[in-house]
Image (cartoon, rainbow, N blue to C red):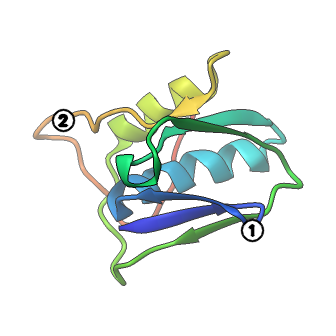
Amino acid sequence: MGKLVYEGSVKAEIEDRALTHLQLVITTKLRRGEPFSFTWREDMSVGGGRTTVWVHAGSSLVFRYSGSRQPSINRNWIEALAFTANAPSGLYLVPEPTEPASAPTTKAPTPALA
């Protein structure tokens, strides 16, 4: 289980594979100078509910992974997450869509976001 740390104090536990995909979307948005909100659901062990943060070029973000290997990238998931990040509601984690059998995956992240 990985962690996203925002501004040194707000932390979200997110599975490594999902965190990798979120990192690709978040860093792409920030490279483009596009601020956005990011919302996640809190685990019941910390009281449940949800947290929303405003992510911008000056945000301090740490992506901490429990595993050492980079997972394969699902471009369909990148596109689905980018769609939410570009919507008024902001980025939130959506379930990983399946990839067509012929779609290649890559270890080198080169997302094409809309």
Q: Residue 99: percent from the left, percent from the top?
A: 20, 37
**In this image, 88 relative to 72: left or right?**
right
Q: Nearer the viewer, residue 82 or 39?
A: 39
Is residue 1 shown above or below 84?
below
Identify the secondary structure beneath mark 2: loop
Res. 58 image quadrant: bottom right
Q: Amino acid at mark 2?
A: Thr
Q: Residues within 10 Å of mark 1 (few under 14, many from 20)?
A: few
| Residue annotated with mark 1 | 8
CA separation in Å, label 1 and label 2: 34 Å
Q: How many marks?
A: 2
Tags 1 and 2 touching, CB below 8 Å: no
| Picture quarter with the C terminus | top right
Q: Residues within 10 Å of mark 2 (few under 14, many from 20)?
A: few
Farthest residue toward the bottom? 68
Q: Residue 87: percent from the left, percent from the top?
A: 62, 18
Q: Residue 113: percent from the left, percent from the top?
A: 57, 35
Q: Residue at x 71, y 64 (%)?
A: 9
Q: Nearer the viewer, residue 21 or 14?
A: 14
**In this image, 41 relative to 16: left or right?**
right
Farthest residue toward the right? 58
Q: Amino acid at mark 1?
A: Gly
> Mark 1 or 2, which is nearer the eye?
1
| Residue annotated with mark 2 | 98
Q: Which mark is residue 94?
A: none
Q: Nearer the viewer, residue 21 or 12?
A: 12
Q: Is residue 100 visible?
A: yes
Farthest residue toward the left? 101
- The mark that comes first in sequence, 1 or 2, is 1
Q: Residue at x 18, y 35 (%)?
A: 98
